[in-house]
Amino acid sequence: MASLLVAVACESVQQPAKNRVINRPTGSLGKAVNTAGDEFAAGYESASKDSFLMFTSNVNGRESVYRVPLPKVASDDSVRSISAPLHEMSSALARNTGTVASNGHTTVFAVSAAVQKELARILKTSGAVLGGSDIFERTATETRNVEELNSAAWDAHPTLSLLKNVEILVFSSDRMSNDGFSAPYDGVEHIRADGSRVRGNADLWYSFRIVGEQRWSAPRNFRSLQTTDSVNTPSNEYSPFIYCVDGTPHLLFASNRSGTYDIYDASLRIDAATKTMAIQSVQALPSGTDAVNTEAREVFPFIPFPHRATSEQQLIFSSDRFALRSPLDAAEVGAGGLDLYRMRTQMLCDIPDTTPKPKVIPKGNLRYVVTLVDGRTGLPTVRQGRITASVDTRSGTITRQTDSAQLVIDLMANDTAVAGGNVRVVATGGSDYSKRPCTEREPIITSYARRRISDRIQQLQTLQRVVQYDTAIQDPPIPVKRAAQLFETLSKGAKYVASTKRKEYVDATADGRLRIGRDTVLTVDSLPPVRTVRKKRLEFYTDTTYHYDTTFLPASSFDVASVRTQASGLAVRWPQQDTVINDTIIVYPLYETAAPCMQVFATSDSVRNVPYFQTGFWEVNTSTGYKRHLERLRKGDLEDAGWIELNWRNQYWGSRTAGEVTDRLERRRLEYRRKAEIIDGNITTLVQRTSHMLQRFWREHGADTNAKLIVSMMAYSDLRPIKVGRFISDTGIRYIAASYDSTRESFGTPTNVFIRPGSSLVGVDNDTLSKLRAYFGYTAVHEILRTDSLYASLRSQGLVVLPTDAATPAEYQERLRSARVIVLAEGRKVDMTVNPSTRGYIGDEDDYYALDAVRRVDVHVRRIDLRAPAWIVPECCR
């Protein structure tokens, strides 16, 4: 395991200027490397070559790769080489590169300038730049865009290592990530599909490839490896470098998570065989005035090759501490911006000894403890719980079971059959507890379940945005005059007269001939250097909105995996000391109350209660019915029906003048209109509650053919006898009237109701009117109830019987036995419980206003069981 100690200062160079000594910061490299521009991305061309230091500099206004002989790196002379050849390819292609990395097989670098077709042909380059910057790789035959790693965002700062026969590539990218923090454009806010917000930043990504293969594996975000220590954060992570890959690997990188950019060290574990890695720890390098990390920016860490087994290394990195602390002094000695520094720091590189050693069995004992807990309380109080755990060892599988809340498996170090190597643990559990509530009015635990959260795409929306990108352009050739010498050779015997006007001169050749030379001026085409321009383009992208559902699967039927083994089991390396591994299985209790065996929709208060149905005459006074009544009163067949309250001829509300609508009648009509809105809601609520009761009834008693659900509708009239009135309709009504008597636990004798058009309503008991109200109340409710999917399904199977389904009472009574849902309608004549003391609508109390609540349809929904010959109310009801 690597440990970081305090960095030790390297050389300190003094530069005299203007009769005074300017002290450059500790570790600063000389003028052969540092300039007034930015110097960064130090590296060597190959892991086996260490004679040249390579780096990127923008001192000439564009980023180019340079290399300087190592002996000149620390000197303070002014020697500096020009752009370095990059495997016979122009270094101008490596722009905004980060490190130019090579492992002996492959060289990788980043390109942010578009590769033009002609230049691409000459350099054997394939692939254009996809995003703000892309990663390219150079082999012995060609340079190509690594399309399998790149995105439409910024991809750069690659570093490359080789472990056995596997190449490892780490790079930085600000692509939109689902499993990390990265998002395009530094600081730009994005809203994810789940509603969370993220600001643009770059994460580190990694990929593997076997030497000789063409394509890299799909890049993965380092956050997928993170537990407690973090490589990636909501801040930027840049400039990775892998050190000591053959031993105890370290991932060095820069991050501004602390406010400014510092260099961090992540200790890794890399398995070349399985192409996997893990993060062991992450910590910042030492900080201080003369340390690696300071108040300035420190980026692009690099440790020269070869990496040998040691605890102290020479670290090269970039920092702008000189320009930040003393900008005038920095400018005076030709430094500034990011400069390269070299310091010694301690970081363990432990190259393993591959000499075969005898197998040693560790001495530690291993205990695995798994607990079954209630997900609501977090306590081990699950009723009738069960746990099963299995441990795969080198000698076989060990399986343990228990009916208690906790299971313990001990693996002892002195048991050579299981000790040593790795073990794999899988644990599942559940509960067989099941109880149906009977008479409880408060919820009780009825069972336990596994919680599953799933998502589905709710909406896909295509959006657009304007993005900026850099591209390289080639300006047209420019005619340039250039001085040149022309020569002409005379043969033997030829004569030539020299001209001083043309500035000719003559000399002799080795074979005795004369050569005449003259100066002239030629005009040639000069190709300007490639330059970078920033352009804009419209980019389309898809914004996805997800809908999340939570479902519960019964723990009695589905095993619930433990928290630590639910993915693919828990792999455990045998410990060096006694170790306890705690695990948890979580199940969630399901609560229910006893099913109501009866719901009563009956009241005299039409405002505060749901089940009130006031009727203007026989039809239900819904909003739709109210409008239809008015149309019939204005120009229809009810125009002469003076016994109807809303008619202009009514004795209480109307006028004796033909067609006159009094203020009193208008107020009454307003009352009916307002109550119609209440009745609309009453019917909807009644149907909803009935539907919920039907669903639970069918879920719990669907298989019991003797279980029935009865919907009873009972219509009432008030005590005023009708002296004048008739049933005004084009068609008659016919249904079977019946009722259920819970006291006698039986159905009353069904009767056939047939009311013809024009039938008289006159009578002291208002029997005909109550029968009409029962029929129209039933149809108003059934019109909405039949849209319920479960009710409609039962109806299609012939399991629902309606008052209008049978032609005779005998047929209706026979169908009751096979039906599962029974709808009853019955006229109950007059409700005598309300008897006004004042005859007429003349006050606010004790008069006919109290009769408004009497004209109604009461609805009862109840559960009964057929136990021939009785129809009994079940015992388990509330």
Image: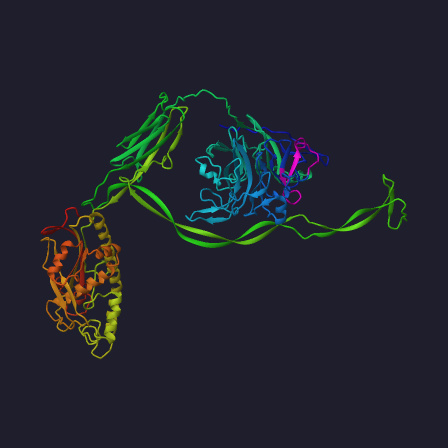
Residues in magenta?
55-81
Against 730, residue 581 (above or below) is: above
Indicate whether residue 702 is drawn in magenta: no
Left or right: 3, with 125 as reference point:
left
User: Where residue 673 appears, x then y in whole percent?
Assistant: 26, 67
Left or right: 478, with 535 as reference point:
right
Q: What residue is drawn where x is 86% and y is 50%?
A: 502
Against 299, residue 745 (above or below) is: below
Q: Is any part of residue 461 visible from this angle?
A: yes
Nearer to the camera, 594 or 691: 691
Left or right: 570, with 846 as reference point:
right
Nearer to the camera, 69 or 398: 398
User: Where residue 598 appears, x then y in whole percent?
Assistant: 18, 52
User: Where residue 357 appears, x then y in whole percent?
Assistant: 47, 20
Nearer to the camera, 371 or 832: 371
Residue 448 picture quarter: top left
